[in-house]
Amino acid sequence: MKRVPSPTLARVLSAAVTVLTVAAGGTQAVTFGGLNVTPRGPQNLNLETGATDLPQGGTATDSRGGVKLTAARMQLQPGQQLSAQGAAITTRQGGTLKAAQVTYDLRAGTVTATGNVTYNDARFTALTAPSMTLNVKTGFVTARGGVKASKPAMTGAALAFDPSTMQAMLSGPYRVNQGTLRADTDAPAGRLLLVFSARSVVRATEDPDSSNRNRFEPYLR
């Protein structure tokens, strides 16, 4: 007499065969949505969804966007996104972004970081915020939800930085106190345009013109 597995056992058996673990070969790179991913250890492939879990993390490089990501753990969702935990990202312009959680949206071309987020480059030191977004195509870095930095010494509601022009816009309420630069407002609609040269702020404008407002506002929303 043929024994039929119970529904519970059948589900367990079904779940067991949907995950394929590729052990060893941890240094072999794979292509994923335009990213070159090098696992640090085994790869757990879910045959049903196509998602891959890298429990020991690895490195993902976007050569076109100039972005490199290393993480303690990664999850790859085909054609959609890369999620990472304990991540550090370097940008084409030399910035370094670190966060507990990172999501690389492949369709939108954005990297969103949350949890103990910090950003550093030649212009900013210890820039922190609850959430930061890197737009891979434009290079813009946006910090939202309450921004702080030790250099330039400032706080604000949000900040958008354009590394191609070395300009940044800070939204109010904000406070900036760096060298001879003093600026502050309690108005949520306040905007401060910062212009950098090398590592220093050389100009600050509390009434940016419409062209600069139009360029930065989409990133500050």
Image (cartoon, helix red, strand yellow):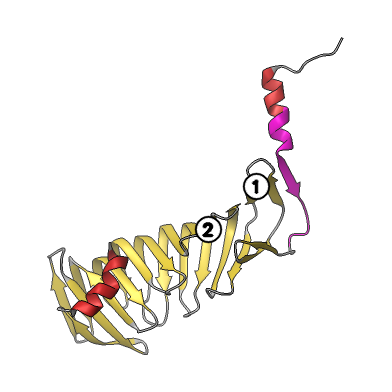
* 144 lies left or right of 100: left
Q: Amino acid at mark 2?
A: Gly
Q: Which mark is residue 86?
A: 2
**Foreground residue among 74 and 165:** 165
Label annotation for residue 30? none
Residue 147 in sight in this render: yes
Residue in view at x 47 percent, y 80 percent: 93
Rendering coords of residue 87 (x, y %): 52, 61
Checking the image for residue 50, the label placed there is: 1
- Check residue 196 for magenta coloring: no
* Element marked by disc 1: loop
Residue 44: give x, y in percent of width and height: 69, 48
Q: Secondary structure at mark 2?
A: strand
The magenta stretch is: 13-26
Q: Is residue 127 visible?
A: no
Q: Quadrant of residue 113?
A: bottom left
Identify the residue at image location x=32%, y=71%: 160
| Kind of residue at badge 1 | Gly
- Whether residue 45 sits left or right of residue 195 in the image: it is right
In percent of the image, x 78 and y 59: which residue is there? 25
Q: Is residue 195 above or below residue 141?
A: below
In this rendering, would 84 be left or right of 6?
Answer: left
Label 2 crowd (10 A; few <14 / some 14-19 / many >=20): some
Residue 99 percent location from the top left of the image? 46, 60
- Image quarter of the N terminus: top right
